[in-house]
Image (tube, coloured by chain):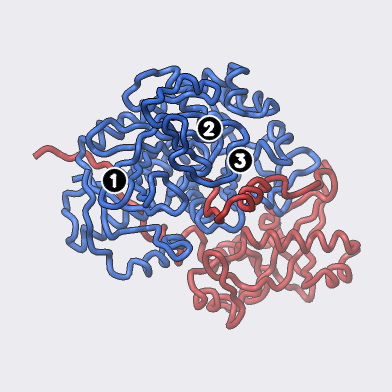
Amino acid sequence: MMERRVKRSQTIDLGRMRKQFLPATKPLSVAIAAASLAGCSDDQEVFVVSSVYDCINQTNWDMATCEAAYQKAMEESEYSEPRFATRQDCEAEFGFNSCNEEFNGYSPDMVGFLVEEGIDEVGDLIAYNTLYRYKGRHKSLRGYVLADGTPVLNQRGRYFVNKKALLTPKIRKANTKTLSRGGFGRQAVAKVAAARSASRSWGG
Amino acid sequence: MYRIPCAERPAWQQKAAEYGFYFHTMYGERYWDESAYYQFSLQQIEEDLEAPTEELHQMCLDVVERVVADEQLLTQFAIPEAQWEFIRHSWLQRDPSLYSRLDFVYDGKHPAKLLENNADTPTSLYETGFWQWLWLEESVDLGRISRRADQFNSLQEKLVARFQHILRQSPEQKTLYFACCKGTLEDRGTVQYLEDCAVEAGWRTAFIFVEDIGLNEAGRFVDLADREIEYLFKLYPWEFMFAEAYAGPLSDSGCQFLEPPWKAVLSNKALLPMLWRMYPEHPNLLPAYFGHEAERLDTSVRWVRKPIYSREGANIQILEQGNILHESDGAYGQEGYIYQQAQILPRFGDAYTLVGSWLVDGLAAGISLREDSGPITQDMSRFLPHIIL
């Protein structure tokens, strides 16, 4: 018999397609274990703050800078917060009543943020990361963690975190200020207003 | 090509929830419809749809080549002059494209005729690439469809491969942002699907709503955390972007786009008269003319007047000897119109059927079938699966 040419995708990984399993997210306990093995020579002191006012109290920054850092941390959390398939999975790591349903899974409450100031050749930088409180089965790791599971070490009230974990969300203090938002999207609004019935999609 | 009624899979709605297919029913009406499927022969697929799809795509690229170099044509395509260089540049440096969908009138007997090319923001991707694929797998397992049945649908496989190819071409690893407008679950789902494909291909990805994109002092587009957006997939039409506040900064933004700017030439109804001019009498084309060529219309047949920019069947008129037979509403048409000879969609039972033929870059990658109760496919048409047997 002649072999048939197959016209469809040969295999699709169904586990990957299930939105309740979110395979792209690393299991948090694995990330924590990996991070804690990394050693402490790269640790950097940071400020752990629970609110804008806490930030003003603990650092020498003004209200505007602390607000900006808080805003950035909130926005950052949309991209990088830990996600779980089910509420149970999330609560197993972050505690009862500490998780919320999001667009594609469950995420723990953000309990604060950390800030760290640095300077490079172009000028001032502020690193900001969102903080979560880990309450899972790894007892020695319980406490503040970053979104990727990196633990924040508490040494008599001073906090330290692996420098590498601080790299991504760094923003420049001055220099490239965002001037505006919302320069795209108006046409969609105008077309909806003009159409008799609401359109579902901007594609076709 | 047959339309075959069949039983729905038990509790498929639960499965849809499990896989995150949220828009199978919209405004109380079914969109995904598995109470029937279409059956094609392999010959119909390969000779009538697959081969013409790839050939037409090459013809479309010839149109781009010609239009970007001709100011008069760019004007006829209603592309703002301020964007000509941006589009030309993206074509000359061969900015990679991802996908498109050609819509065909096809009845299984006569040559498929191109109605239009959704080259910029085609949707119904997830339903095609994954959901109808899963339907076939499960229907075969349930014993309702022959084990020998296949489907013209390598869309997901080809998308992942294409993302891998584009990733390998990028000299540095950028984060690929995915964007759509707020308030449409369908678009959000489509973009999530593409993001999943990109992740599988090894991309680092992020999501942002179109309305949340910002502009910084350096003229770069930024996300909500003020990080620069260097590569953006936008499920948002170029012609909208060209008419908005950030149109000016586009060309100097340093951002690379999917689909690339040159797709603005293809997702434009002016493509149709241009194809007919360059390839007259091609078996897969319908006669088409620009708005100013109305005197060339053969009045013994019906014509469809379409706005140069329009979506989902808006602002379409069907004309017979200059009289309007049928008209659809909408907010398009300020940019001008084109005429295309009317070819009424075939009817299978009560429904009018449209065949969407997908391309990933230049490769035919599968089909989707949509049914509508009227002869113009609108937003609320239903999506049906298909098999090859």
User: Are the residues under badges 1 and 3 in a single subunit?
Assistant: yes
Quarter of the image for residue A48 reads bottom right
Q: Which mark is residue A84?
A: none
Q: Which mark is residue B347?
A: 1
Sequence-wise first label, 2 or 3: 3
Q: Secondary structure at mark 2?
A: loop
Picture coordinates of residue B184, whole percent (x, y): 55, 57
Q: Which mark is residue B231?
A: 3
Front label number (2 vs 1)? 1
Q: Is residue B50 left or right of residue A91?
A: left
Tell me if label 1 and label 3 are in contact, CB under 8 Å. no
Q: Is residue B176 visible?
A: no
Q: CA distance from mark 2 to mark 1?
A: 27 Å
Check the image and report above or below for B246 versus A69: above
Check the image and report above or below for A203 versus A66: above
Front label number (1 vs 3)? 1
Q: Amino acid at mark 3?
A: Tyr
Chain letter of the residue carrying label 2: B
Picture coordinates of residue B351, whole percent (x, y): 32, 51
| Chain depicted in blue | B
Q: Amino acid at mark 1?
A: Arg
Picture coordinates of residue B112, whole percent (x, y): 31, 33
Rendered hue of chain A is red
Check the image and report above or below for A184 versus B84: below
Q: Is residue B14 visible?
A: yes
Tell me if label 2 and label 1 are in contact, CB under 8 Å. no
Q: Which residue is mark 2?
A: B268
Picture coordinates of residue B349, whole percent (x, y): 25, 51
